[in-house]
Image (cartoon, rainbow, N blue to C red):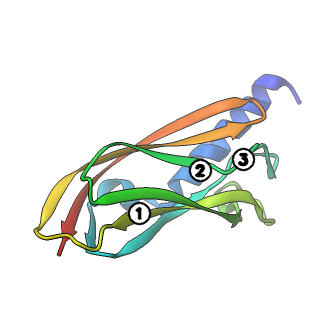
Amino acid sequence: MHVGLKMLSAILSLGAGILTGGAAAGERPIVLKGGESIELWPLYFVVNCRSILKGPPVAEVLEGPPELTVTVREQKVIPRKVNCAKEVPGGMLILTAAKDIKARTQGRLIFRIIYQTKDGERKMSHEFDVTLLP
């Protein structure tokens, strides 16, 4: 396969993987009570339904309430958005609110996911309005 087509396939797969949570994940605010966690969407990077990850994806918070953490739980995932049927290495994106939230907090969460792939490092950024409740 031509390198350009290979890269395009990987980018399309990545974009589809990021949108797994559906449009609602990017349009509606996220609301969490103290101590709650939610799974946002599976993370993977595939070409022809084969992972090209060299390690698990990593989440990095760039801006947001300090009571909020974004992590990646390493696990095998099925890249359904790109019509793959078999599990591939990847992870689940997890958002967690601290247990000791004392007052309602609202803010903007900006984070990125870093993928180490066979074709180099790839970064994808995301933003959400978040509300944290005691």
User: What's the distance in space between the residues labelled 3 and 1, CA to CA?
Assistant: 20 Å
SS category of the residue bearing label 3? loop
In which image quadrant can residue 89 be found? bottom right
How many badges with numbers are in the image?
3
Q: Is residue 89 left or right of residue 112?
A: right
- Amino acid at pointer 2: Ala
- Amino acid at pointer 1: Leu
Instruction: Characterize the local packing of mark 3: few (<14), some (14-19) or many (20 or more) Cα atoms within 10 angstroms.
Output: few
Instruction: Characterize the local packing of mark 2: few (<14), some (14-19) or many (20 or more) Cα atoms within 10 angstroms.
Output: some
SS category of the residue bearing label 1? strand
SS category of the residue bearing label 2? helix
Residue 12, x across and y down, in percent:
64, 41
Which residue is at the front of the view, 63 or 126? 63
Q: Quadrant of the N terminus?
A: top right
Provide the residue designation for mark 1: 95
**Which residue shows up at 41% across the image and 63% down it?**
95
**In the rendered structure, which disc, 2 or 1, sits on the residue that comes first in sequence?**
2
**In the rendered structure, which disc, 3 or 2, sits on the residue that comes first in sequence?**
2
Do residues under tags 3 and 1 come within 8 Å of each other at their CB atoms? no
**Which residue shows up at 68% across the image and 65% down it?**
75
Provide the residue designation for mark 3: 55
Q: Is residue 87 left or right of residue 98?
A: right
Instruction: Characterize the local packing of mark 1: few (<14), some (14-19) or many (20 or more) Cα atoms within 10 angstroms.
Output: some
Q: Quadrant of the C terminus?
A: bottom left
**Which residue shows up at 70% across the image and 32% down it?**
8
Do residues under tags 2 and 1 come within 8 Å of each other at their CB atoms? no
- Amino acid at pointer 3: Gly
Residue 70, x across and y down, in percent:
43, 56
Compared with 18, 25 (above or below) is below
User: What's the distance in space between the residues labelled 2 and 1, CA to CA?
Assistant: 20 Å
Provide the residue designation for mark 2: 16
